[in-house]
Image (spheres, helix red, strand yellow):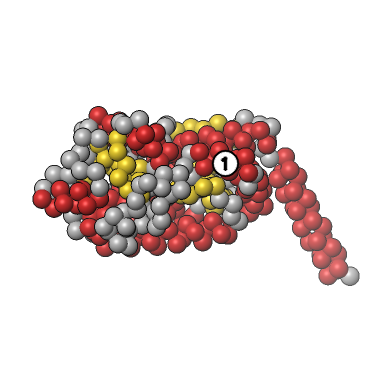
Amino acid sequence: MRYRQLATAALGAALLTCAQTAIAQDAFPTRTVRIVVPYPAGGGTDVLGRFVAENLARKWGQSVIVENVGGAAGNIGAADVFRAAPDGHTLMVASPGPIATNNFMYKDMPYDPAKWTPVALLATGPYVLTMRKSFPGASVKDLVAYAKANPGKVTAATPGVGSVGHLATVELEMLAGIKTTLVPYRGLSPAVNDIIAGHVDLMFDTPTTSLPLHRDGKVKIIATGTPERVAEFPEIPTIAEAGVPGYRAVTWYAMVAPPQMAPALADRINRDVNEILGRSDIAAKVRAFQMDAVTKSRAEAAKFFGEESELWGKVIKAANIPLQ
């Protein structure tokens, strides 16, 4: 009899907890949701983050704001989110650095990327090799020849140490047998400004920012980091076909939450994000940013983060990039 009473009480408590959790998920969000983009405004991550925020606000009937908290290749903004309450009202939209690669680059990480709550993989996109318009050459072969004839004189902008733009440059150095002088910036926008002004020779960038500049004649895109040519600009060759076999550099954008978020809440946000990105009209708008919308489960997103971390970790170790 005593056993039955205990069992009944335990079952009742469990059902009450489940009911309370369900009510909490149904009620979410109860106030403004803050999405941190850990880079300065204006880059591809910021553009996508604001687009997702706008559509989530419509779906949730609640304000969703984007805050740009840049610095240290995303580490400052990421640390801000990492310390937040895991109640869904503080999220992060970022490219790979704070999620999968910065831990290979920094000695003193202010957060543990392994403890993020994966929420959603939002989009993938190509990286393009962008040159200042006055650079003496218009192809990968021209660049490699010039760099070999002038070792260390080619300057390469990166939007922060450990960013995909930085690692893409290192991968090019390794596979093409050249050496550049890396010039790290505090985010993408200042790096793009210096490419336009001709202060640096090259950078790896997303088409979101570089393609309009290329078409306006302000910079020149000479190749893409994708395995195959990009449908939106098929006239531009891949780096692999242009003389550096095996080269691959693509980027991605994801949403994560602070550690220890309730799985049911993370699943709810994942479903809402995927429902938005799965719409044909939304996917078309994402393609206009030169990205491809992605709809994956949280488990699939977590697996993808791990695979990317392994890939770029190998590049970083092979290149002996010193810890920052």
Q: In the image, is residue 170 above or below residue 84? A: below
**Residue, x 41% and y 56% (percent of image)?**
228
Q: Quarter of the image for the N terminus: give it.
A: bottom right
> In the image shown, does 70 or 41 lie closer to the viewer?
41
Residue 167 is situated, as x and y percent measured from the top left of the image, at: 31, 52
Residue 239 is situated, as x and y percent measured from the top left of the image, at: 31, 54
> In the image shown, does 31 or 210 lie closer to the viewer?
210
Residue 315 is situated, as x and y percent measured from the top left of the image, at: 31, 60
**Residue, x 40% and y 41% (percent of image)?**
207
**Residue, x 16% and y 52% (percent of image)?**
145
Q: Is residue 156 left or right of residue 60?
A: left
Image quadrant of residue 300? bottom right
Q: Is residue 158 left or right of residue 311?
A: left
**Residue, x 48% and y 45% (percent of image)?**
291
Q: Residue at the right extreme? A: 1
Q: Residue at the front extreme? A: 235
Numbered label tally: 1
Question: How many residues crowd mark 1 within 10 Å: few (<14), some (14–19), many (20+)?
Answer: some
Visible residue check, residue 244: yes
Question: Tag 1's secondary structure?
Answer: helix
* Kind of residue sitting beneath label 1: Ala
Q: Which residue is mark 1?
A: 284
Residue 269 is situated, as x and y percent measured from the top left of the image, at: 63, 46
Visible residue check, residue 110: no
> In the image shown, does 181 or 210 lie closer to the viewer?
210
